Image (cartoon, rainbow, N blue to C red):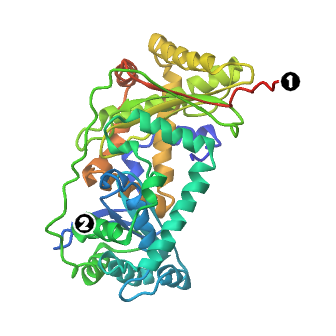
Amino acid sequence: MLRHVATRLGLTLLLSLPPMLAQAAGEVTEFYLDNGMQVVVIADDRTPAVTHMVWYRVGAADEPPGLSGIAHFVEHLMFKATDDVASGEFSRVVEANGGSDNAFVSWDYTAFFQRVAADRLGLMMQMEADRMRDLVFDPVEVDTERSVILEERAQRTESSAGALFNEQMRAALFLNHPYRIPVIGWRHEMERLSADHARAFYDTWYHPNNAILIVAGAVSPDDVRALAQTHYGAIPASDRLPNRARPTEPPHIADRRVHLADARVANPYVSIQMLAPVREPGDQAEAAALVYLAELLGGSGQTSLMARRLQIEEERSLYAAAFYDPTGVDPSGFSLINVPVPGLSLEEAEADIWRMIDSLLADGIDADHFARIRFQIEAGKIYEEDNTQSLARSWGMDLASGLSVADIQGWPDVLAAVTPDDVMTAARRLFSDPATVTGFLLRPEPTEVSQ
Protein backbone atom coordinates (compact mmCIF):
# COMPACT_ATOMS: atom_id res chain seq x y z
CA MET A 1 0.00 0.00 0.00
CA LEU A 2 1.32 3.41 -0.88
CA ARG A 3 2.19 5.73 1.95
CA HIS A 4 0.31 8.98 2.12
CA VAL A 5 2.38 11.99 1.08
CA ALA A 6 1.15 14.77 3.26
CA THR A 7 2.49 17.95 1.76
CA ARG A 8 2.39 19.54 -1.66
CA LEU A 9 6.13 20.17 -1.29
CA GLY A 10 6.78 16.46 -0.80
CA LEU A 11 4.65 15.66 -3.83
CA THR A 12 6.53 18.16 -5.96
CA LEU A 13 9.90 16.83 -4.86
CA LEU A 14 8.99 13.22 -5.54
CA LEU A 15 7.50 14.05 -8.93
CA SER A 16 10.80 15.63 -9.84
CA LEU A 17 12.86 12.56 -8.93
CA PRO A 18 14.45 10.74 -11.85
CA PRO A 19 12.83 7.32 -12.37
CA MET A 20 15.97 5.33 -11.66
CA LEU A 21 15.98 6.57 -8.05
CA ALA A 22 13.58 3.71 -7.50
CA GLN A 23 16.72 1.57 -7.51
CA ALA A 24 18.38 3.52 -4.66
CA ALA A 25 18.29 0.80 -1.99
CA GLY A 26 21.76 -0.36 -2.96
CA GLU A 27 23.90 -2.04 -5.56
CA VAL A 28 22.53 -5.21 -7.14
CA THR A 29 25.06 -7.92 -7.96
CA GLU A 30 24.31 -11.06 -9.98
CA PHE A 31 26.48 -14.14 -10.42
CA TYR A 32 26.11 -17.89 -10.95
CA LEU A 33 27.64 -20.80 -9.07
CA ASP A 34 29.32 -23.53 -11.10
CA ASN A 35 26.26 -25.76 -10.61
CA GLY A 36 24.03 -23.19 -12.32
CA MET A 37 22.43 -21.62 -9.26
CA GLN A 38 21.63 -17.95 -9.90
CA VAL A 39 22.56 -15.59 -7.06
CA VAL A 40 21.38 -11.99 -6.68
CA VAL A 41 22.64 -9.77 -3.86
CA ILE A 42 20.82 -6.53 -2.99
CA ALA A 43 23.00 -4.50 -0.65
CA ASP A 44 21.19 -2.36 1.93
CA ASP A 45 23.13 -1.18 5.00
CA ARG A 46 20.15 0.57 6.60
CA THR A 47 19.29 -2.51 8.62
CA PRO A 48 21.44 -5.16 10.36
CA ALA A 49 19.01 -7.86 9.21
CA VAL A 50 19.13 -9.85 5.99
CA THR A 51 16.46 -11.61 3.98
CA HIS A 52 17.57 -14.95 2.56
CA MET A 53 15.31 -16.41 -0.13
CA VAL A 54 15.55 -19.46 -2.36
CA TRP A 55 13.18 -19.51 -5.31
CA TYR A 56 12.51 -22.54 -7.49
CA ARG A 57 11.31 -22.07 -11.05
CA VAL A 58 8.38 -24.40 -10.56
CA GLY A 59 4.81 -23.88 -9.45
CA ALA A 60 1.30 -25.16 -9.81
CA ALA A 61 1.30 -24.60 -13.58
CA ASP A 62 4.14 -27.13 -13.90
CA GLU A 63 2.35 -30.01 -12.17
CA PRO A 64 1.75 -33.35 -13.89
CA PRO A 65 -1.86 -33.83 -15.04
CA GLY A 66 -4.03 -35.31 -12.32
CA LEU A 67 -1.75 -34.22 -9.49
CA SER A 68 -3.04 -30.72 -8.80
CA GLY A 69 -1.75 -29.36 -5.52
CA ILE A 70 1.51 -31.32 -5.60
CA ALA A 71 3.66 -28.14 -5.78
CA HIS A 72 1.96 -26.77 -2.67
CA PHE A 73 2.16 -30.18 -0.98
CA VAL A 74 5.93 -30.40 -1.52
CA GLU A 75 6.33 -26.85 -0.19
CA HIS A 76 4.69 -28.05 3.06
CA LEU A 77 6.83 -31.17 3.20
CA MET A 78 10.02 -29.09 2.92
CA PHE A 79 9.54 -28.24 6.61
CA LYS A 80 9.68 -31.92 7.58
CA ALA A 81 12.74 -34.06 8.22
CA THR A 82 15.95 -34.23 6.22
CA ASP A 83 18.90 -36.53 6.72
CA ASP A 84 20.32 -34.04 9.23
CA VAL A 85 17.37 -32.07 10.63
CA ALA A 86 14.34 -33.43 12.47
CA SER A 87 10.82 -32.68 11.33
CA GLY A 88 9.81 -29.15 12.30
CA GLU A 89 13.32 -28.34 13.51
CA PHE A 90 14.07 -25.93 10.65
CA SER A 91 11.66 -23.25 11.85
CA ARG A 92 12.56 -23.84 15.49
CA VAL A 93 16.22 -23.15 14.71
CA VAL A 94 15.33 -19.98 12.81
CA GLU A 95 13.21 -18.76 15.71
CA ALA A 96 15.89 -19.66 18.26
CA ASN A 97 18.27 -17.45 16.30
CA GLY A 98 15.91 -14.49 16.48
CA GLY A 99 14.55 -14.85 12.96
CA SER A 100 11.34 -15.67 11.12
CA ASP A 101 10.69 -17.91 8.14
CA ASN A 102 7.97 -19.03 5.80
CA ALA A 103 7.29 -20.21 2.26
CA PHE A 104 4.76 -19.74 -0.51
CA VAL A 105 3.87 -21.17 -3.88
CA SER A 106 2.13 -19.73 -6.91
CA TRP A 107 1.52 -20.93 -10.46
CA ASP A 108 5.03 -19.97 -11.59
CA TYR A 109 7.32 -20.38 -8.58
CA THR A 110 7.92 -21.76 -5.10
CA ALA A 111 9.89 -19.71 -2.57
CA PHE A 112 11.36 -20.21 0.90
CA PHE A 113 12.67 -17.34 3.02
CA GLN A 114 14.16 -16.38 6.36
CA ARG A 115 14.76 -12.97 7.88
CA VAL A 116 17.62 -13.03 10.38
CA ALA A 117 20.57 -11.05 11.68
CA ALA A 118 23.36 -10.83 9.13
CA ASP A 119 25.70 -13.03 11.17
CA ARG A 120 23.19 -15.92 10.92
CA LEU A 121 23.17 -15.97 7.12
CA GLY A 122 25.58 -18.90 6.87
CA LEU A 123 23.36 -21.01 9.13
CA MET A 124 20.33 -20.26 6.97
CA MET A 125 22.20 -21.30 3.84
CA GLN A 126 23.40 -24.47 5.53
CA MET A 127 19.86 -25.54 6.43
CA GLU A 128 18.31 -24.45 3.13
CA ALA A 129 20.95 -26.31 1.14
CA ASP A 130 20.31 -29.39 3.27
CA ARG A 131 16.63 -29.54 2.39
CA MET A 132 17.28 -28.77 -1.28
CA ARG A 133 18.39 -32.36 -1.87
CA ASP A 134 18.13 -34.37 1.37
CA LEU A 135 14.42 -34.24 2.20
CA VAL A 136 13.01 -37.40 3.79
CA PHE A 137 9.52 -38.45 2.65
CA ASP A 138 8.33 -40.37 5.67
CA PRO A 139 4.95 -41.99 4.81
CA VAL A 140 3.47 -41.10 8.20
CA GLU A 141 4.52 -37.45 7.82
CA VAL A 142 3.17 -37.39 4.27
CA ASP A 143 -0.22 -38.73 5.36
CA THR A 144 -0.41 -36.20 8.19
CA GLU A 145 0.53 -33.29 5.95
CA ARG A 146 -2.01 -34.36 3.31
CA SER A 147 -4.68 -33.92 5.94
CA VAL A 148 -3.25 -30.46 6.69
CA ILE A 149 -3.50 -29.25 3.09
CA LEU A 150 -7.00 -30.67 2.74
CA GLU A 151 -8.03 -28.76 5.84
CA GLU A 152 -6.34 -25.65 4.43
CA ARG A 153 -8.46 -25.98 1.31
CA ALA A 154 -11.56 -26.39 3.44
CA GLN A 155 -10.78 -23.27 5.48
CA ARG A 156 -9.47 -20.95 2.77
CA THR A 157 -11.51 -21.97 -0.25
CA GLU A 158 -14.51 -24.10 0.52
CA SER A 159 -15.60 -21.97 3.48
CA SER A 160 -15.67 -18.81 1.33
CA ALA A 161 -18.17 -18.11 -1.41
CA GLY A 162 -15.82 -15.51 -2.87
CA ALA A 163 -12.88 -17.92 -2.99
CA LEU A 164 -14.98 -20.58 -4.71
CA PHE A 165 -16.22 -17.97 -7.19
CA ASN A 166 -12.68 -16.81 -7.99
CA GLU A 167 -11.64 -20.42 -8.50
CA GLN A 168 -14.51 -21.01 -10.96
CA MET A 169 -13.80 -17.74 -12.79
CA ARG A 170 -10.17 -18.68 -13.33
CA ALA A 171 -11.14 -22.14 -14.52
CA ALA A 172 -13.42 -20.48 -17.10
CA LEU A 173 -10.88 -17.88 -18.22
CA PHE A 174 -8.19 -20.39 -19.21
CA LEU A 175 -9.42 -23.01 -21.63
CA ASN A 176 -6.18 -24.96 -22.00
CA HIS A 177 -3.45 -23.40 -19.89
CA PRO A 178 -2.76 -24.85 -16.40
CA TYR A 179 -3.30 -21.41 -14.88
CA ARG A 180 -6.91 -22.61 -14.74
CA ILE A 181 -6.02 -25.06 -11.94
CA PRO A 182 -6.04 -23.75 -8.35
CA VAL A 183 -2.64 -23.58 -6.68
CA ILE A 184 -3.92 -25.49 -3.67
CA GLY A 185 -5.35 -28.14 -6.00
CA TRP A 186 -8.70 -29.75 -6.64
CA ARG A 187 -9.82 -31.72 -3.59
CA HIS A 188 -10.42 -35.02 -5.40
CA GLU A 189 -6.85 -34.96 -6.72
CA MET A 190 -5.30 -33.73 -3.48
CA GLU A 191 -6.80 -36.72 -1.67
CA ARG A 192 -4.68 -39.14 -3.71
CA LEU A 193 -1.33 -37.36 -3.45
CA SER A 194 1.26 -39.81 -2.14
CA ALA A 195 4.83 -39.91 -0.91
CA ASP A 196 5.87 -41.27 -4.31
CA HIS A 197 4.18 -38.36 -6.09
CA ALA A 198 5.86 -35.85 -3.79
CA ARG A 199 9.32 -37.40 -4.14
CA ALA A 200 9.04 -37.56 -7.92
CA PHE A 201 8.08 -33.88 -8.10
CA TYR A 202 10.88 -32.92 -5.69
CA ASP A 203 13.46 -35.01 -7.54
CA THR A 204 12.44 -33.41 -10.84
CA TRP A 205 12.53 -29.73 -9.88
CA TYR A 206 14.47 -29.10 -6.64
CA HIS A 207 17.99 -28.60 -7.95
CA PRO A 208 20.45 -25.70 -7.81
CA ASN A 209 20.28 -25.08 -11.56
CA ASN A 210 16.53 -24.52 -11.15
CA ALA A 211 16.96 -22.19 -8.15
CA ILE A 212 17.55 -18.51 -7.53
CA LEU A 213 19.21 -17.35 -4.32
CA ILE A 214 18.39 -13.80 -3.29
CA VAL A 215 20.05 -12.12 -0.32
CA ALA A 216 18.99 -8.57 0.58
CA GLY A 217 20.29 -6.48 3.45
CA ALA A 218 23.54 -5.67 5.22
CA VAL A 219 25.78 -7.99 3.24
CA SER A 220 28.58 -7.74 0.72
CA PRO A 221 28.51 -9.63 -2.58
CA ASP A 222 31.89 -11.20 -1.81
CA ASP A 223 30.67 -12.57 1.53
CA VAL A 224 27.51 -13.94 -0.06
CA ARG A 225 29.51 -15.53 -2.85
CA ALA A 226 31.80 -17.28 -0.36
CA LEU A 227 28.91 -18.54 1.78
CA ALA A 228 26.86 -19.64 -1.23
CA GLN A 229 29.80 -21.53 -2.65
CA THR A 230 30.38 -23.24 0.68
CA HIS A 231 26.80 -24.33 1.26
CA TYR A 232 25.16 -24.56 -2.17
CA GLY A 233 28.16 -25.00 -4.45
CA ALA A 234 28.71 -28.66 -3.67
CA ILE A 235 25.18 -29.67 -4.71
CA PRO A 236 25.34 -31.15 -8.21
CA ALA A 237 23.23 -29.73 -11.00
CA SER A 238 20.53 -31.88 -12.53
CA ASP A 239 21.11 -33.05 -16.11
CA ARG A 240 17.43 -34.00 -16.44
CA LEU A 241 15.78 -30.70 -15.61
CA PRO A 242 12.67 -30.39 -17.78
CA ASN A 243 11.84 -27.41 -19.92
CA ARG A 244 8.79 -25.52 -18.70
CA ALA A 245 6.78 -26.61 -21.72
CA ARG A 246 3.22 -25.57 -21.02
CA PRO A 247 0.04 -25.81 -23.07
CA THR A 248 -0.93 -22.52 -24.65
CA GLU A 249 -4.32 -20.90 -25.00
CA PRO A 250 -6.28 -21.34 -28.23
CA PRO A 251 -8.08 -18.29 -29.62
CA HIS A 252 -10.96 -17.28 -27.37
CA ILE A 253 -13.97 -16.98 -29.68
CA ALA A 254 -16.92 -17.12 -27.27
CA ASP A 255 -18.05 -15.25 -24.21
CA ARG A 256 -18.38 -17.38 -21.11
CA ARG A 257 -20.58 -16.73 -18.11
CA VAL A 258 -20.30 -18.06 -14.57
CA HIS A 259 -23.20 -17.83 -12.11
CA LEU A 260 -22.55 -18.99 -8.57
CA ALA A 261 -25.35 -18.76 -6.01
CA ASP A 262 -24.35 -19.18 -2.38
CA ALA A 263 -26.33 -18.43 0.74
CA ARG A 264 -23.20 -17.02 2.41
CA VAL A 265 -22.96 -14.10 -0.03
CA ALA A 266 -23.44 -10.80 1.79
CA ASN A 267 -23.02 -8.44 -1.17
CA PRO A 268 -23.57 -9.85 -4.65
CA TYR A 269 -21.14 -8.62 -7.30
CA VAL A 270 -20.13 -8.99 -10.92
CA SER A 271 -16.64 -9.73 -12.24
CA ILE A 272 -15.44 -9.41 -15.83
CA GLN A 273 -12.13 -10.99 -16.82
CA MET A 274 -10.12 -11.25 -20.03
CA LEU A 275 -6.70 -12.48 -21.07
CA ALA A 276 -3.90 -9.92 -20.95
CA PRO A 277 -0.19 -9.95 -21.81
CA VAL A 278 2.46 -9.81 -19.11
CA ARG A 279 5.98 -8.38 -18.94
CA GLU A 280 8.09 -10.08 -21.60
CA PRO A 281 11.89 -10.28 -21.34
CA GLY A 282 13.19 -7.32 -23.30
CA ASP A 283 9.70 -6.01 -24.09
CA GLN A 284 7.75 -4.66 -21.12
CA ALA A 285 6.03 -1.66 -22.72
CA GLU A 286 2.52 -3.06 -23.15
CA ALA A 287 2.47 -4.47 -19.62
CA ALA A 288 3.51 -1.07 -18.30
CA ALA A 289 0.63 0.58 -20.15
CA LEU A 290 -1.78 -1.97 -18.64
CA VAL A 291 -0.49 -1.13 -15.15
CA TYR A 292 -1.60 2.45 -15.77
CA LEU A 293 -4.90 1.31 -17.27
CA ALA A 294 -5.81 -0.72 -14.18
CA GLU A 295 -4.96 2.22 -11.93
CA LEU A 296 -6.88 4.73 -14.06
CA LEU A 297 -9.98 2.55 -14.28
CA GLY A 298 -10.12 1.05 -10.82
CA GLY A 299 -7.05 1.63 -8.68
CA SER A 300 -7.57 4.29 -6.04
CA GLY A 301 -10.88 4.23 -4.22
CA GLN A 302 -11.06 8.02 -4.47
CA THR A 303 -9.67 9.01 -7.85
CA SER A 304 -10.05 6.11 -10.31
CA LEU A 305 -12.75 6.42 -12.95
CA MET A 306 -14.93 3.56 -11.72
CA ALA A 307 -14.72 4.45 -8.04
CA ARG A 308 -15.21 8.18 -8.57
CA ARG A 309 -18.16 7.83 -10.90
CA LEU A 310 -19.94 4.72 -9.60
CA GLN A 311 -19.23 4.99 -5.88
CA ILE A 312 -19.05 8.72 -5.22
CA GLU A 313 -20.85 10.65 -7.94
CA GLU A 314 -23.64 8.26 -8.92
CA GLU A 315 -23.79 6.20 -5.68
CA ARG A 316 -24.49 3.04 -7.66
CA SER A 317 -21.65 0.93 -6.25
CA LEU A 318 -20.40 -0.10 -2.87
CA TYR A 319 -17.04 -0.94 -4.43
CA ALA A 320 -15.63 -0.91 -7.96
CA ALA A 321 -12.09 -1.78 -8.99
CA ALA A 322 -9.76 -3.11 -11.68
CA PHE A 323 -6.84 -5.50 -11.20
CA TYR A 324 -3.85 -6.49 -13.29
CA ASP A 325 -0.71 -8.41 -12.36
CA PRO A 326 2.04 -7.69 -14.90
CA THR A 327 4.37 -10.52 -13.85
CA GLY A 328 4.04 -14.10 -15.04
CA VAL A 329 5.66 -16.73 -17.21
CA ASP A 330 2.65 -16.77 -19.54
CA PRO A 331 -0.20 -14.33 -20.34
CA SER A 332 -2.54 -13.86 -17.44
CA GLY A 333 -5.69 -11.81 -16.86
CA PHE A 334 -7.13 -8.33 -16.45
CA SER A 335 -10.20 -8.13 -14.23
CA LEU A 336 -12.84 -5.63 -13.18
CA ILE A 337 -15.40 -5.99 -10.40
CA ASN A 338 -18.44 -4.02 -9.34
CA VAL A 339 -20.41 -4.48 -6.12
CA PRO A 340 -23.70 -2.65 -6.67
CA VAL A 341 -25.68 -0.92 -3.96
CA PRO A 342 -28.71 -2.88 -2.72
CA GLY A 343 -31.58 -2.62 -5.17
CA LEU A 344 -29.44 -2.63 -8.32
CA SER A 345 -29.29 -5.88 -10.26
CA LEU A 346 -26.06 -7.56 -11.31
CA GLU A 347 -27.11 -7.00 -14.91
CA GLU A 348 -27.12 -3.26 -14.20
CA ALA A 349 -23.75 -3.56 -12.45
CA GLU A 350 -22.33 -5.36 -15.48
CA ALA A 351 -23.64 -2.62 -17.77
CA ASP A 352 -22.05 0.00 -15.51
CA ILE A 353 -18.61 -1.59 -15.93
CA TRP A 354 -18.90 -1.47 -19.70
CA ARG A 355 -20.25 2.08 -19.52
CA MET A 356 -17.08 3.12 -17.66
CA ILE A 357 -14.90 1.38 -20.25
CA ASP A 358 -16.79 3.06 -23.10
CA SER A 359 -16.40 6.40 -21.33
CA LEU A 360 -12.63 5.97 -21.11
CA LEU A 361 -12.36 4.92 -24.75
CA ALA A 362 -14.51 7.85 -25.89
CA ASP A 363 -13.20 10.64 -23.65
CA GLY A 364 -9.55 9.68 -23.30
CA ILE A 365 -7.39 10.28 -20.22
CA ASP A 366 -7.38 13.41 -18.12
CA ALA A 367 -3.85 14.81 -17.94
CA ASP A 368 -4.00 15.66 -14.24
CA HIS A 369 -5.34 12.22 -13.37
CA PHE A 370 -2.58 10.59 -15.42
CA ALA A 371 0.05 12.67 -13.60
CA ARG A 372 -1.33 11.52 -10.23
CA ILE A 373 -1.18 7.90 -11.30
CA ARG A 374 2.38 8.32 -12.53
CA PHE A 375 3.37 9.78 -9.16
CA GLN A 376 1.67 6.95 -7.26
CA ILE A 377 3.44 4.31 -9.34
CA GLU A 378 6.87 5.93 -9.02
CA ALA A 379 6.40 6.56 -5.29
CA GLY A 380 5.32 2.96 -4.82
CA LYS A 381 8.56 1.70 -6.34
CA ILE A 382 10.53 3.94 -3.97
CA TYR A 383 8.58 2.92 -0.88
CA GLU A 384 8.96 -0.76 -1.78
CA GLU A 385 12.63 -0.42 -0.96
CA ASP A 386 11.95 0.46 2.67
CA ASN A 387 11.58 -3.27 3.37
CA THR A 388 14.30 -5.67 2.26
CA GLN A 389 11.88 -8.59 2.47
CA SER A 390 9.39 -7.03 0.05
CA LEU A 391 12.26 -5.98 -2.20
CA ALA A 392 13.71 -9.51 -2.27
CA ARG A 393 10.25 -10.91 -2.90
CA SER A 394 9.67 -8.55 -5.83
CA TRP A 395 13.01 -9.45 -7.41
CA GLY A 396 12.49 -13.16 -6.88
CA MET A 397 9.01 -13.14 -8.38
CA ASP A 398 10.30 -11.34 -11.47
CA LEU A 399 13.37 -13.54 -11.93
CA ALA A 400 11.44 -16.77 -11.39
CA SER A 401 8.96 -15.62 -14.04
CA GLY A 402 11.71 -15.37 -16.65
CA LEU A 403 12.74 -11.71 -16.47
CA SER A 404 16.40 -10.73 -16.34
CA VAL A 405 18.21 -8.42 -13.94
CA ALA A 406 18.37 -5.87 -16.77
CA ASP A 407 14.58 -6.15 -17.25
CA ILE A 408 13.96 -5.54 -13.56
CA GLN A 409 16.35 -2.62 -13.34
CA GLY A 410 14.81 -1.11 -16.46
CA TRP A 411 11.20 -1.51 -15.31
CA PRO A 412 10.97 1.90 -13.56
CA ASP A 413 12.17 3.59 -16.76
CA VAL A 414 9.65 1.65 -18.82
CA LEU A 415 6.87 2.74 -16.45
CA ALA A 416 8.09 6.34 -16.53
CA ALA A 417 8.03 6.36 -20.34
CA VAL A 418 4.33 5.41 -20.62
CA THR A 419 2.15 8.09 -22.23
CA PRO A 420 -1.64 8.52 -22.27
CA ASP A 421 -1.58 7.46 -25.93
CA ASP A 422 0.18 4.22 -24.94
CA VAL A 423 -2.52 3.50 -22.37
CA MET A 424 -5.31 4.21 -24.85
CA THR A 425 -3.71 1.91 -27.43
CA ALA A 426 -3.42 -0.87 -24.86
CA ALA A 427 -7.02 -0.29 -23.73
CA ARG A 428 -8.40 -0.50 -27.26
CA ARG A 429 -6.49 -3.71 -27.88
CA LEU A 430 -7.57 -5.26 -24.57
CA PHE A 431 -11.24 -4.36 -24.78
CA SER A 432 -11.59 -5.29 -28.43
CA ASP A 433 -11.26 -8.96 -27.48
CA PRO A 434 -14.58 -10.58 -28.41
CA ALA A 435 -14.35 -13.16 -25.65
CA THR A 436 -14.60 -12.35 -21.96
CA VAL A 437 -15.65 -14.23 -18.87
CA THR A 438 -18.43 -12.56 -16.89
CA GLY A 439 -19.28 -13.89 -13.47
CA PHE A 440 -22.17 -13.23 -11.11
CA LEU A 441 -21.74 -14.10 -7.44
CA LEU A 442 -25.16 -13.88 -5.87
CA ARG A 443 -27.49 -15.22 -3.23
CA PRO A 444 -29.93 -18.00 -4.14
CA GLU A 445 -33.44 -16.99 -5.02
CA PRO A 446 -35.78 -17.48 -2.06
CA THR A 447 -37.87 -20.61 -2.40
CA GLU A 448 -41.59 -20.47 -1.93
CA VAL A 449 -42.97 -22.58 0.88
CA SER A 450 -46.16 -24.42 -0.14
CA GLN A 451 -49.10 -24.20 2.17
Tell me the residue that label 2 is attached to: 204
Which amino acid is tagged 2?
A: Thr
Rendered view: 233 above or below 59? below
Give percent across and percent down for residue 394.
Answer: 41, 54
Q: Quadrant of residue 350?
A: top right
Residue 279 location in percent, x, y?
31, 41
In the image, what residue occupies the spot 45% across and 68% down?
76
Which residue is the extreme one toward the right?
A: 451
- What residue occupies the far bottom of the structure in this picture? 84
Q: Identify the image quadrant of residue 269.
A: top right
In the image, taking residue 75 as reference, residue 40 lies left or right, namely left
- Measured as percent of width and height from the top left, residue 197 is found at 33, 66
Q: Name the one closer to the observer, 359 or 201.
A: 201
Residue shown at 54% from the left, 37% from the top = 12
Q: Secondary structure at mark 2?
A: helix
Relative depth, front residue between 242 and 209: 242
Residue 20 shows in this picture: yes
Residue 160 % position (x, y): 62, 46
Q: Helix, strand or loop at disc 1?
A: loop
State left or right for residue 350 relative to residue 255.
Answer: right
Residue 268 vertical placement versus 152 (above, below): above
On screen, residue 216 versus residue 162, left or right, reads: left
Kindly identify which numbered label has been placed on residue 451.
Answer: 1
Q: Nearer the viewer, mark 1 or mark 2?
A: 1
Earlier in the chain: of badge 1 and badge 2, it is 2
Q: Would you call the spot at circle 1 few (<14 residues within 10 Å), some (14-19), or many (20 or more)?
A: few
Residue 49 visible in the snapshot: no
